[in-house]
Image: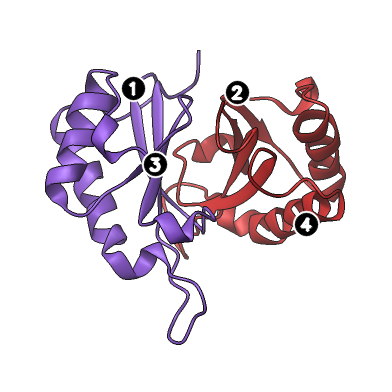
Chain colours: A red, B purple
Amino acid sequence: MSYYQRHIFFCVNDRGPNADRPCCGKCGTEALRAHAKQRIKALDLAGEGKVRVNSSGCLDRCEEGPVCVVYPDGIWYTFVDEFDIDEIVESHLVDGVPVERLRI
Amino acid sequence: MSYYQRHIFFCVNDRGPNADRPCCGKCGTEALRAHAKQRIKALDLAGEGKVRVNSSGCLDRCEEGPVCVVYPDGIWYTFVDEFDIDEIVESHLVDGVPVERLRI
């Protein structure tokens, strides 16, 4: 079994001004990652054998972003706001049911 | 199948001076992550369906660090230098054979 039952990585890469590709970091992903982390903590689901929420560098799916990926499942999402994040947390990270409407 | 066949995340978190826990970022992990990325690129293994090398925030295994994790396998390593990184790249990321001597 994995050290974490589910491990979610949010791309927070910011390419800066005048970049030739879009980037997740300009879409408020750092705040949404923090929101996910706070929700997991509030649900007492943080830690070994449970869930870990992380930021990451560029996941190279920029044109589909903002993106996050849940491992070991290998399931990718895009999202807009805290409502989407709450659904990923409660459905996928807690109950193990992927959120089909947000998958990429 | 996962978007990436194997996806490796290197913790590059640096807690700064006077921290009460060790941190991977003080162990040269950013340079070692860059080395891994360069090796994967040189082997023409970067991209969709192949391998992705990323940095991440704190993976919360600080006392066992520096650490990286390979998904979807969920296999964790510690490492010291480029020799260790080359072995992880060539054995695990290329051939799919975990490097037992470096596992945590």
Between A64 and B57, the one nearer to me in the picture: B57
Instruction: Chain letter for mark 2, please.
Output: A
Q: Are marks 1 and 3 in contact (CB under 8 Å)?
A: no
Give percent across and percent down for residue B78: 32, 48
Give percent across and percent down for residue B100: 28, 30
**What amino acid type is highlighted by mark number 3?**
Ile
Instruction: Chain letter for mark 4, please.
Output: A
Residue at the (81%, 34%) spot, across then down: A94
User: Between disc 1 and disc 3, whose residue precedes?
Assistant: 1
Q: Is residue A62 above or below residue B67?
A: above
**What amino acid type is highlighted by mark number 1?**
Lys
Q: Residues within 10 Å of mark 2 (few under 14, many from 20)?
A: some
Q: Which residue is mark 2?
A: A73
Q: Is residue B28 left or right of residue A100?
A: left
Residue A51: assigned label: none
Instruction: Chain letter for mark 3, please.
Output: B
Q: Which residue is mark 3?
A: B104
Q: Is residue B46 above or below residue B9?
A: above
**What amino acid type is highlighted by mark number 2?**
Asp
Q: Which residue is mark 1?
A: B50
Mark 2–mark 3 Cα distance, whole angstroms, equals 21 Å
Quadrant holding the N terminus of chain A: top right
Q: Residues within 10 Å of mark 1 (few under 14, many from 20)?
A: some
Mark 2–mark 4 Cα distance, whole angstroms, equals 21 Å
Q: Is residue B39 left or right of residue A94?
A: left
Q: Are marks 4 and 1 in contact (CB under 8 Å)?
A: no
Q: Which residue is mark 4?
A: A35
